[in-house]
Amino acid sequence: MKLRSLYAGTALALLIVSAGPSWPQDTAQAEAEAQVVNREQVEESVTAETDSQLADKRTALIQEAVDALDETNAAIAAIEKGDTDAAIAALV
């Protein structure tokens, strides 16, 4: 009986010792996987925000160009009518 208990205790101790090093490896792997997932989420968020900001700036730039064309057309129309003061005012 004592020999059986000794074998059981030794087997249990060997099992615990052999399983010990895998816990830190599993933890490190889980942490690495979590970091990858977190990085991907951050990249997606940053990409979405950047795309949104670029779209806003593109819209503002296009509107500025349209406004400049409208002012130029108004100035040309004023010149055609001979009203140089209105043409200058349209461009300022």
Image (cartoon, helix red, strand yellow):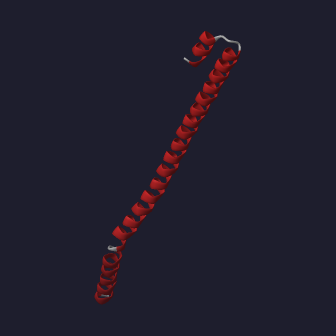
Residue that appears at 51% across and 43% down: 50
Image quarter for residue 66? top right
Q: Position of residue 65 (x, y in %)?
A: 60, 30
Classify residue 10 by image quadrant.
bottom left
Taking depth in this image into account, of 35 and 61 the one nearest to the observer is 61
Residue plotted at (54% across, 35% down): 57
In this rendering, would 5 be left or right of 89?
A: left
Q: Position of residue 37 (x, y in %)?
A: 48, 57
- Which of these two is toward me, 49 or 65? 65
Number of numbered discs overlaid on the protein picture: 0
Q: Quadrant of the C terminus?
A: top right
> Residue at image x 29%, y 85%?
6
Say whether residue 15 is left or right of residue 74.
Answer: left
The quarter of the picture where residue 77 lies is: top right
Residue at 54%, 45% in the rendered image: 48
Task: In this rendered view, identify the residue nearer to me: 71 or 79.
Answer: 79
Q: Is residue 1 above or below residue 21?
A: below
- Which quadrant is the N terminus positioned in? bottom left
